[in-house]
Image (spheres, rainbow, N blue to C red):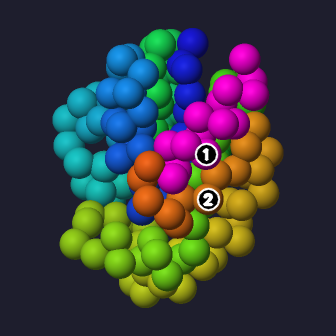
Amino acid sequence: MARLVLVGLPGVGKSTVARMLSAEWNCQHVDTDDIIVKKAGCSIGDFIREKGEPAFRELEFEALEEALKSEGVVATGGGIVTFEKSRAALKGAPTVWLDTHDDQITPRLGGTDRPLLDNNPGQILKLMREARAPFYEEVSRARVDASGTLEDVKNQIRIVAGSWA
């Protein structure tokens, strides 16, 4: 089972933090987005545009199941919590919700292929937060403020993850 799973809004830094923690902890880094791209044979954006979000959420759940079998740090897609089967899988995992203010996230989203944020990313991000926050809270053992430096975020995660041992 995964050592740690990170959830949170798009652009909050889940992949970056997962890579850094896995290097520090000398374990595997697994990103559900990477698994999806490999399985789909195309980008996530292309998959969603071609097959739709419901088909994407099913594929994302399959990627989550695979990722949770690893002994590493898992970064998930921002909307993984919107799918009931994925939330059920996450409830049994050591999950941390990375969160920060929207004004810090929005600049990180520029130039990325995110079809669910295409029109007015700032407003859509606000709506995503409202809809997803209860789900992030439901599946997470802790909420970590990701507004500081990467070292600050790692230290916060070390503290909360250490309390689970």
Q: Look at label 2 and name its amino acid.
A: Asp
Q: Is residue 158 magenta?
A: yes
Instruction: Tell me which numbered mark, 1 or 2, is placed earlier along the sequence.
Output: 2
- In the image, 25 versus 9, the foreground residue is 25
Q: CA distance from mark 1 to mark 2?
A: 8 Å
- In the image, 142 versus 139, the foreground residue is 142
| Residue interval drawn in magenta | 152-165
Q: Quadrant of residue 48?
A: bottom left
Residue 5 is situated, as x and y percent measured from the top left of the image, at 56, 33
Residue 156 visible in the snapshot: yes
Vertical placement of residue 43 versus 62, above or below: below
Vertical placement of residue 94 versus 70, above or below: below
Residue 109 is situated, as x and y percent measured from the top left of the image, at 34, 70
Vertical placement of residue 84 versus 98, above or below: above
Q: Look at the magenta stretch and give its main secondary structure.
A: helix
Q: Which residue is mark 1?
A: 156
Q: Look at label 1 and name its amino acid.
A: Gln
Label pair 1/2, CB-CB below 8 angstroms: yes
Q: Which residue is mark 2?
A: 145
- Is 23 on the left or on the right of 42, as rendered? right
Q: Residues within 10 Å of mark 1 (few under 14, many from 20)?
A: some
Mark 1 or 2: in front is 1
